Amino acid sequence: MSTPRQSPLGSALALAMALFPLAGLAQDAAAPRSVAPLPAELPDSGEPTPPSPVVADEAAGTPGLDADFGIGRPATAEEIAAIDIDATPDGQGLPDGRGSYAEGKALYDERCVACHGENLKGIPETGGPALIGGRDTLAGDKPLKTVESYLAHASTLYDYIHRAMPMDAPGSLTPDQVYAISAYILGRAGILDETAVLDRETLPQVRMPNAEGFTADPRPERL
Ligand code: HEC
């Protein structure tokens, strides 16, 4: 079927006419409404369709789980392990390894000092925030959020450094190095002493100053 070409002015008029009755409808909710009838069945376009994600065992209650979309492949155990690195407050997910304050100081001076400063109070020009200080300031006029003042669990520090720092090479630190740097930062914060050695057993036992500063999630079953 061929349609006559419309001038831009004709298109604008058609658009206005299409919109105007709608505005009228909005004012008069009782006006009758109509819709175009849907075709009973769409004509077959001949295009290939992807396989349905709903598999035959839907009745068994697991629709889609075994679906084959024809792309990708299952991740290998090594690939999953490489990104399954989260550590929880009770120590789950923390890897083997250990590190001391002294080792951490050497690493910090090499990998972190440029952005977080020798005194760990941050270097604004680099965007590196203060890591220590600010204790008990969170409820005041000038809250200073740092590892020392804010974090409720030492595992968050471990997890964050392991995953995201140093900012110019995230993921490049070994577990030993992350334990060591965590011990150094917590030592400089006055939370641990300089003889501290952290590993998967001792790190979850660290008591953070703001441990009680959070409201418990009222829906633990959702986590
Ligand atoms: C190139 C600059 C740079 C380097 C190097 C660097 N950081 Fe950072 N760091 C940042 C920036 C910027 C942020 C803030 C990121 C944000 O808020 O998203 C940050 C945030 C952090 C935080 C979170 C602080 C908070 O209170 O939320 C920690 C902990 C941290 N860095 C530790 C380290 C450690 C440990 C190293 C060395 C292994 C390191 N960083 C190296 C730039 C850097």
Image: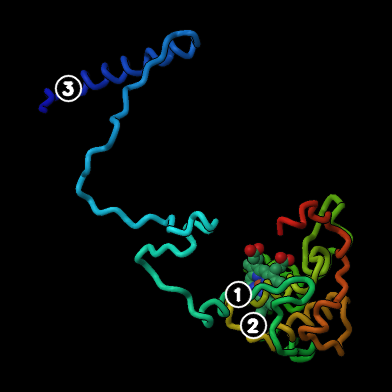
Q: Amino acid at mark 3?
A: Ser
Q: Is residue 54 left or right of residue 45?
A: right
Tag 2 residue: 111
Tag 1 residue: 84
In the rendered image, residue 99, in percent from the top left (x then y), is placed at 75, 89
Which residue is at a point 84% across and 63% down the rendered structure image? 134
Q: Amino acid at mark 2?
A: Arg
Position of 151 relative to 189 (above/below): above
The quarter of the picture showing ligand 1: bottom right
What numbered label is drawn on residue 7?
Answer: 3
Residues tagged 3 and 1 counted as in contact (Cβ below 8 A): no
Q: State the SS at label 1.
A: loop
In the rendered image, residue 107, in percent from the top left (x then y), is placed at 69, 87
Whole-Å distance between the Cαs marked 2 and 3? 66 Å
Q: Amino acid at mark 1?
A: Asp
Q: For residue 174, which quarter of the picture? A: bottom right
Neighbours of disc 2 within 10 Å: few (<14), some (14-19), many (20+): some
